[in-house]
Amino acid sequence: MTVIEIDIVFDFICAWCYIGKRSLDRAIALYRKTYPGGRNDTITIKWGPFYLNPNRHGHRVAKSVLFNERLQDKTPEQRAALVKRLDKIAQSVGVCINYGGMIGPDTRDAHRLVYLSRKDPTIGSEVHGELVEKLLEAYHGREMDISRPEVLKEAAVAAGIEAAVVEVDEEARKYREIEGIRGVPRFLFQGKYEWDGEDLQEFMEIMGKVKAETIYTHYYTIDNISSPEWEAAWPQLVEDAQKIIDNSGVPLSGPDFDDPGPPIIDVNQGLFLNGVGDDGHEPLCLDRHGNGGFSFVKTARKPYDDVVACILLRAAVLAPNCVSLDSDGDWEHDWWIARHLYRNLWGGDVECPWSETEVATEVADD
């Protein structure tokens, strides 16, 4: 499982932000459906405030007044063309943009509501997204004034509301002045990859980069090391580990990936191996007395991961009552090469040795 963080800077009065959110929702849905292991990833979204076009009148005005002020340098023909283009793109993502209604002095209360919900540890990212969706729909689709208490029912928070106003304003200033943002929406993945909110192929490429960079870990423990089962399994595991290495075709080193020495595969010394150079990360460490002082191995999805996974899988098969195994990887996709290597050596496939909740979910979804 990969944890993917997306930071979005937006304002409720921006129709392109509404369109961008719907585009993001669709892109995430497609990613979960089509990308290997995507449905098991955790995607968290942080909504950051931005005051795009504050109402400088100091009171409620018609949205059309602000619209005309913002486009005052455009001819009627240019305005009509912009509206036509906006409506066409909005319809393509299932968004209805209406231009009537009123708006108060600013969108601070709406941003405050989202901010307060984000600070509540019991409210998840999906709830934040639903809240943002409803507020965008209220303003753009239902022509409601999102600065009014009757629209923002939750805005009447008694405790800490003034402090929240200050923090929201400070956060908005940070995005505008410190980070130099002048337009929204802005989508930022893992704090470094920007997306324009439109190009679906670019979105999938960014998600792929994020997954590739995620520290990818397998977890293992060896119990009952004095049992007959483990005593019998250990020498067989050492012999089988050498078979896995010989048939993998993956360059390997000893535990230190900067050391050109070969991996250690020995009944007495144990199993200690890593990738080579830039293709190495953390070593797999196993010995007769258990896990060699380690309880996990981070492979970062580098090539030697397939050898590590296959050896751990073989250990779990040889000593099922002694070896406990878990992984960040998806059994159906991330473990496919290791399972294929195992099948070539010993015939047949094996069941997932840890909780099969992910697999059961995939079957149910299909």
Image: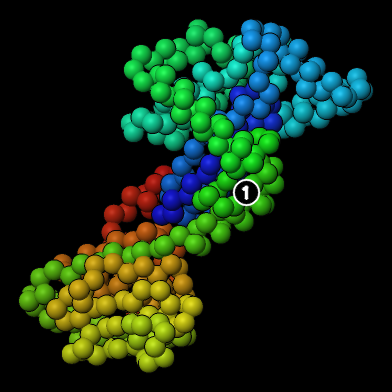
Q: Position of residue 339 (x, y in %)?
A: 40, 71
Where is mark 1, residue-wise?
A: 194
Residue ID at (67%, 52%): 201
* 107 relative position to 57: left or right: left
| Nearer-the-camera pick, 189 or 357 | 189
Tag 1 secondary structure: strand
Residue at point 41%, 54% (across, down): 1
- Spot the residue most to the front: 177
Give the image location of residue 10, x and y in percent: 60, 32
Where residue 56 sits in the image (x, y, percent)? Answer: 68, 15
Q: Is residue 167 above or below residue 276?
A: above
In the rendered structure, the answer to whether residue 1 lies left or right of residue 174 reads: left
When asked about the image quadrant of residue 35, the answer is: bottom right
Q: Residue furthest bottom?
A: 261
Residues packed near mark 1 inside 10 Å, few (<14), some (14 to 19) or many (20 plus): some
- Regarding residue 121, the answer to whether it shows in the image is yes
Q: Amino acid at mark 1?
A: Glu
Instruction: Classify residue 265 as left or right of residue 306.
Output: left
Residue 213 spot, x, y in % from top left: 49, 62
Image quarter for residue 256? bottom left
Residue 20 visible to an observer of this rendering: no
Residue shown at the point (30%, 89%) measured from the top left: 264
Question: What residue do we see at 45% from left, 83% from top?
Answer: 276
